[in-house]
Every structure is written in structure tokens, then in C-alpha cells.
Amino acid sequence: MENHKAGFVAILGKPNVGKSTLMNQLVGERLSIITSKAQTTRHRIMGIINGEDYQIVYSDTPGIIEPKYELQKAMMGFVDSSLEDADLILLVVEMGMKEIEESILEKLGQVGSPVFLVLNKVDLGDQEAVNEKMNYWREKFPFKDIIPVSALHGFNCDTVFDSIVDSLPVHPPFFAKDELTDKPERFFASEIIREKIFLNYQKEIPYSCEVAVTAFKEEEAIIRIRAEIYVERSSQKIILIGKGGQMLKKVGTEARKDMEEFFQKKVFLEQFVKVDSDWRKKVSRLKNFGYKN
């Protein structure tokens, strides 16, 4: 174990550039929920990869935004904490991005850890366009390397992985070698439900929802899960439940199917919708939901 490498790798970027897709590719498991809507990821989610002589601890983080209310401030707190212990940083940008705020690059420069630029969605441009983008970013910041990828299709993700392993410091493992993530099972149950809400509803509904798993009982043949979905207004509750409860039933059916695949076990899921006005702005509620210490 004397030459064992281990380190924390922070995956950063603006909303919707493909951070969660990249992490899921690198980890080989679907730990982070993915939708086409911005700000789907709200927490810092760690994915752990173990080899005989290395351990990589990835941190998928919320998309970097200018926070407007308490929930968004807490989300940006997760970004900052992932930077504090990062041995390596992956800054993810996409082909269509014109620029990134100087403040983000300044912050990366202050951290002092090597920064790799991952240019995602290269399948959307030809080789000339990809080369142009790589040259553009090369002039912006002294990245250790710029790696073009298509996270969705898994293109060149092995190059990212090899670059990370090469750059890790020599260190004993931080977690047990059989661990996959730092999050408990009920966290993933709540995230799967939240993903289905993002996929099935429009406008403000997904952003106004939070899911709390209040019971997670694993029996020999089945897992019994009780989840409470919080919204901010009664009108949102009506939309969420839908006519005759059909929309909520659809969410539950889709979530249960994914949970059974994730947990490799039969799942019985109960869902209840509750109104908690302006929960996104209340520090006490955010603490209950795990956003603040």
C-alpha cells in the first residue's frame, strides 16, 4: 500500500454542461440524477472508484450560479466545500459555451490544485470546431490538460480517468474499498423521485419540490419506502397530484421501477404531498432537508 494513490476530484461547471452524466460515466453507476433542466443536482454527491492501488473520490456538485435565495446559497456552499478538499478539479464546459465568469477562474487559480478542462458534447461539432474551442480555452487559464469528451456517449472518458489516476497524490484510501458513495440509500430513493418530478412537470413545479424519505424499511423480499414531497403552495400540490391522482401515480410508478433496478430488490413506495410555504428560503427547513449543517 506504500505506493497507493488516493484523492478527491471535484467536478465543477455551469448548469446543464453534463457534470452528472460525466460522473456517472466515470463511476460506472447512476448516482447522480440527470434531466435536461438546469439545477437538477442540489447536493454534493460523492462517487468512489477503487482499484488495487488507487481510490478516486468524485464529487458531483450543483451547477455554478449566482445564488438568489437560501437554497441556492446552500447549493453553492457544496461547490465551495468540494473545492476546499479537492486534490484535482475537472471544470466541465460544453461546445456551445461562449465564456465562463472570470470569478470562477480566479477561484480555481487560488485553490492551487491541478485543473483539467473537460470539453463536453464534442459530438455536436466537427473536428475544426473542437480544435477552435480547445485553443480558446487554452488561452483562458493554465489548465493541466484539455480533454474533449462526449459524456453522454462515453467518448474519451477513459482518457479523463487515466489522467486522474496519473495525477493523484500518494495516499492511503479515505474510504473502505467496498464503498461506492458517501450517501445513504434513502438519499438515492429521494433523488430518484425528484428526478421523476423534473421529468414529468414543467415550469416552477420541479424547482419548488423537495423529497424527504421518512421511512426506509428493508425486509428480506422487499423494501418499503415512505416519501413526503414538499411544495410551496396549494396550487402546486394540485398540479403535482393531478386529476384523480394520475400524475402522482405516474411519478410513483416510474420511481419505483428505477428504485428496483438501483437497489436490486422489490420496492413498495408510498408518496404523500405536503405544503410548506417558501421552504427554499427558510434556513431551518433547509437544515432538515440536509442542505445546511
Image (cartoon, helix red, strand yellow):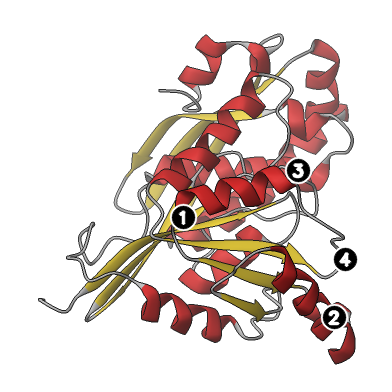
Q: Are marks 4 and 1 in contact (CB under 8 Å)?
A: no
Which quadrant would the C terminus be assigned to in this image?
top left
| Secondary structure of residue under mark 2 | helix
- Which label was assigned to residue 198? 3
Q: CA distance from mark 2 to mark 4?
A: 12 Å
For the residues bearing labels 4 and 3, Cβ distance under 8 angstroms = no
Q: The N terminus appears in which quarter of the rendering?
A: bottom left
In front: 174, or 284?
A: 174
Residue 156 in sight: yes
Tell me the amino acid under the disc marked 3: Phe
Q: Return the residue found at the far bottom.
A: 127
Q: Which residue is mark 2?
A: 132
Which of the two marks, 4 or 1, is nearer to us in this view?
Answer: 4
Q: Position of residue 241 (x, y in %)?
A: 78, 27
**Which element carries disc 3, helix, strand or loop?**
helix
Q: Which callout, 2 or 4, points at the residue further toward the start of the chain? A: 4
Which one is closest to the eye, mark 2 or mark 4? Answer: 2
Q: Nearer the viewer, mark 4 or mark 3?
A: 4
Q: Position of residue 50 (x, y in %)?
A: 30, 72
Q: Earlier in the sequence, mark 1 or mark 2?
A: 2
Give the Cα distance between marks 2 and 3.
34 Å
